[in-house]
Image (cartoon, rainbow, N blue to C red):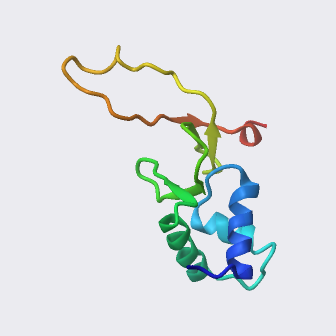
Amino acid sequence: MYRETRQRKAIRRALKDAGHPLSPNELLEAAREHVSSLGIATVYRNLKSLQEEGRIVPVELPGEPARYEVAGKGHHHHFHCRQCDKVYEVDGCPGNLGSVTPPGFHLEDHEFVLYGLCDLCVA
């Protein structure tokens, strides 16, 4: 069982309001708008417990530390901006990947990460 502290509430709100995956440091910055005294250790503690409870999921990108997003969003992919380092959700999926799966292999899951510049960095 957990306690819904001000810090935990601020972390959950920041994740929900962001609408895209956040790194622990991005989460700290966003949650500090609601609880200015929040520390990084508290963020990590809450990320661990929220993940154990199934409220959030890690977003793993090759060669990058994990970011986190609210659980239950369904299948989607991500766009990683190479300039500002933010990660955004991408709706949609190319679908049936049987044509690119090697013969005799059994595909169980997939993840696509798109790389480039986000709309803010392009401007």
Instruction: Check the image and name the residue furthest to the left.
Output: 104
In the rendered view, tell whether residue 123 sits above or below residue 24: above
Q: Of residues 11 and 41, which is closer to you in this image?
A: 11
Left/right of residue 94 with respect to residue 5 in the rendered view:
left
Q: Find residue 12 and report its horizontal and vertical position in percent.
A: 69, 66
Furthest residue in direction front, as rendered = 1
Q: In which quadrant of the rendered view does residue 32 lie?
A: bottom right
Decide if residue 49 is on the left or right side of residue 102. Answer: right
Please identify the quadrant where the N terminus is shown: bottom right
Image quadrant in which you'd find residue 102: top left
As displayed, is residue 110 above or below residue 72? above
Farthest-out residue, bottom: 37
* Residue occupying image coordinates x 31% and y 29%: 107
Residue beneath the point at 60% across and 75% down? 43
Q: Residue at x 65, y 64 (%)?
A: 26
* Up/down of 89 relative to 47, above or below: above
Which of 25 and 82 lies nearest the eye of the viewer? Answer: 25
Name the image quarter holding the C terminus. top right
At a point 70% along the width and 82% down the height, the residue shown is: 5
Which quadrant of the view contains residue 93? Answer: top right
Q: How many marks?
A: 0
In the image, residue 33 lies at what x, y percent?
Answer: 81, 72
Q: Position of residue 101 (x, y in %)?
A: 30, 21
